[in-house]
Amino acid sequence: MSKEDKTKVVTNVVRLSYANVWESRLIGGVEKYSVSIIIDKDDKDTLEKIEKAVNTAIEDGIKKFGKVMMDESNLKLPLREGNDMGEDAYKDKYFLNASSIIPPEIVDKDVKPILIHDEVYSGVFARVSVRFYPYNKNNNTGVGCGLLNIQKIADGERLCGSRSTAKEDFQVVEDDFLS
């Protein structure tokens, strides 16, 4: 296994939130595709793979940036406590944010491309491939998470707050509405 492969993780089934996977958005001055990946705390397999990949990225960072990557008190890590988000979907979960300047490939359970944007949204259950990498920008050090690909597994309740659908807001307008 190459060094690059040791920083790559394919998750088990997770939930997507803040899914900006169809169109890029401005993040830190750069157009990126991004998603928040919500992971069950019971998913030991995914969490173990993430821990190993993050540790490899830290080792890579020490080789690339030196001792600055060894100060764990200032090192920003990608896996975070979901309870800190204050949102029900994150309660008793972990999460990480992944992004990329390159659009992810998005496929269904049969690994066929999904072309209808409404099929993948915040709340959907999916498997995600990501790659962890070290960074040191202006002595701001840590491990980032690059978004690679998404495989939709199942629909889930939409995570869109209080947003309603057009069908909920409107009713059919008869042709004679002006009479």
Image (cartoon, rainbow, N blue to C red):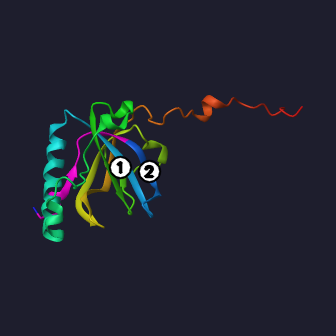
Name the image quarter holding the C terminus. Answer: top right
Tell me the residue that label 2 is attached to.
Answer: 20
Q: Nearer the viewer, residue 82 or 15?
A: 82
**Camera-side mark, 2 or 1:** 2
Tell me the residue that label 1 is attached to.
Answer: 107
**Which residue of the protein is positioned furthest toward the right in this rendering?**
179
Residues under labels 2 and 1: Cα distance? 15 Å
**Would you say 152 lies left or right of 9 here?**
right
Queried whether the magenta region covers residue 15, the answer comes back as yes
Circle 2: element type: strand
Where residue 89 sits, quadrant-wise, is top left
Q: Which residue is painted at 13% across and 58% down in the image?
A: 56
Q: Is residue 33 above or below residue 164?
A: below
| Residue 146 percent location from the top left of the image | 30, 58
| Residue 76 numbered mark, or none | none
Q: Which residue is painted at 75% across and 32% down in the image?
A: 173
> What is the count of numbered marks?
2
Q: Is residue 118 above or below residue 100?
A: above
Name the image quarter holding the N terminus. Answer: bottom left
Question: Could one spot residue 108 in this view of the protein?
Answer: no
| Residue 30 percent location from the top left of the image | 43, 64
Queried whether the magenta region covers residue 5, the answer comes back as yes
Question: Could one spot residue 144 in this view of the protein?
Answer: yes
| Residue 141 percent location from the top left of the image | 25, 61
| Residue 133 percent location from the top left of the image | 23, 61
Choose the circle earlier in sequence order: 2 or 1. Answer: 2
Circle 1: element type: strand
Q: Which residue is painted at 17% across and 62% down in the image?
A: 69
> Which segment is the magenta one?
2-16
The three-letter code of the residue at mark 2 reads Asn
